[in-house]
Image: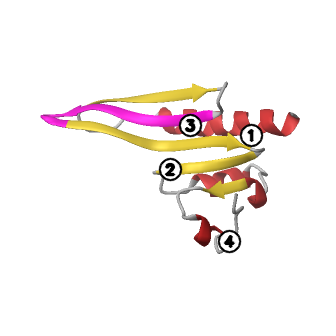
Amino acid sequence: MEKLEKYRAYIEQIIKDYGSFKPSYGNVDVQILFDHEHEHYQLSSIGWDDDQRIYGCLLHLDIKNGKIWIQHDGTEIGVAKELVALSVPKEDIVLAYHPPYKRSHTGYAVA
């Protein structure tokens, strides 16, 4: 249980850090979404840039079976690298945005 609490805290801190930056264009809000009951964590941008609608997911992570599943990573640095720097073992990180047959070549967990 201690490991899961640590993983939740790491994910939430990373998302809060990225969520503290407001886009420099348009009237765009950044939304931080934490669903502790189902272990879903997300950062989205929502708003308008002139007459263009802005809506998108910047980060989406889940915790499943004791591992961190990165469903979407819209960062330049890479959330997996940030998690490893926080001492999360690569075998506890799944790059879920890659198809299962490619995951064994990433250096991270397959599932």
Q: Residues within 10 Å of mark 1 (few under 14, many from 20)?
A: many
Q: Position of residue 16 (x, y in %)?
A: 56, 32
Query: What's the residue at 69%, 47% (across, down)?
Result: 68
Report the coloring of the rendering.
secondary structure
Look at mark 3 in the image and give the residue it sits on. 15
Q: Secondary structure at mark 4?
A: loop
Q: Quadrant of residue 49?
A: top left
Q: Residues within 10 Å of mark 3 (few under 14, many from 20)?
A: many
Q: Using the rendered image of the protein, determine whether residue 21 is visible from the camera's viewpoint.
A: no
Magenta: main secondary structure equals strand
| Residue type of the residue flagged with mark 1 | Tyr
Disc on res. 104: 4
Mark positioned earlier in the residue sequence (2 or 3): 3
Mark positioned earlier in the residue sequence (4 or 2): 2
* Residue that sits furthest to the front in the current view: 101
Distance from Cα at disc 3 to Cα at disc 1: 12 Å
Distance from Cα at disc 4 to Cα at disc 1: 22 Å
Look at mark 2 in the image and give the residue it sits on. 72
Q: Bounds of the magenta span?
A: 40-52
Specify whether 31 is left or right of 35.
left
Query: Vertical placement of 82 versus 45: above or below?
Result: below
Query: Vertical placement of 15 versus 101: above or below?
Result: above
Q: Nearer the viewer, mark 2 or mark 1?
A: 2
Q: Secondary structure at mark 2?
A: strand
Q: Quadrant of residue 95?
A: bottom right
